[in-house]
Image (spheres, rainbow, N blue to C red):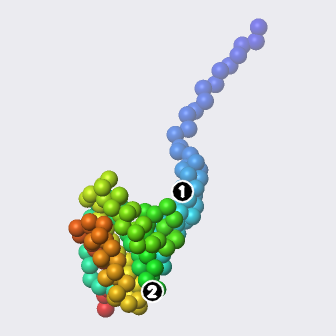
Amino acid sequence: MPRTVYRRRRLVSEINVVPYIDVMLVLLIIFMITAPLLKQGVEVDLPTAPANPLEVGSPEPIVISVDKAGLLYLNIASAPEASIDDNSLVEQVRKALRIQPQRPVMVRGDASGPYQNVVRTLVLLQRANVESVGLVTDPEEIK
């Protein structure tokens, strides 16, 4: 009867990094695709001014964008890219603040548009019982 010889295989103690590289490449592709989608609202040429950013832990703000022509856009509307009329804006902001009263309200006004457009928006927000409104600006460039 022939005798069987068993050889012990040596354990390999190296880490296989190929799966980690694959995961990183997939994440990179996902971030490259979703980053442009994170842009909020409508294209508005914001004025520049020194301002403090929102706190990290604060809830997502309600953002009303006012373009050069005075059209209003609401980021929490069913179609944020479509303009919204005054009464719908007041109603939707009032409803959102009833659900989450501490939610910040921000206005993005076009820098080259008439100041009257921003004032009209502030009056609408006053009708919606908004107590505090922030104005969105681009940060000033440091020279």
Q: Can you say whether 136 is above or below 10 in the image?
A: below
Which image quarter holds the N terminus?
Answer: top right
| Quarter holding residue 3 | top right
Q: Which of marks 2 and 1 is nearer the N terminus?
A: 1
Q: Position of residue 118 (x, y in %)?
A: 34, 82
Q: Can you say whether 90 is above or below 98 in the image?
A: below
Residue pointed to by mark 1: 27
Q: Can you say whether 81 is above or below 110 in the image?
A: above
Q: Where is residue 97 in the image (x, y as percent from the top left)?
A: 31, 59
Residue pointed to by mark 2: 68
Distance, label 2 to label 1, CA atoms, is: 38 Å
Identity, as a three-letter code, of the amino acid under mark 2: Lys
Q: Can residue 44 be seen in this view?
A: no
Q: Where is residue 35 in the image (x, y as percent from the top left)?
A: 50, 66
Tell which residue pokes out farthest to the top in this image: 1
| Quarter holding residue 48 | bottom left
- Mark 1 lies on a secondary structure that is helix
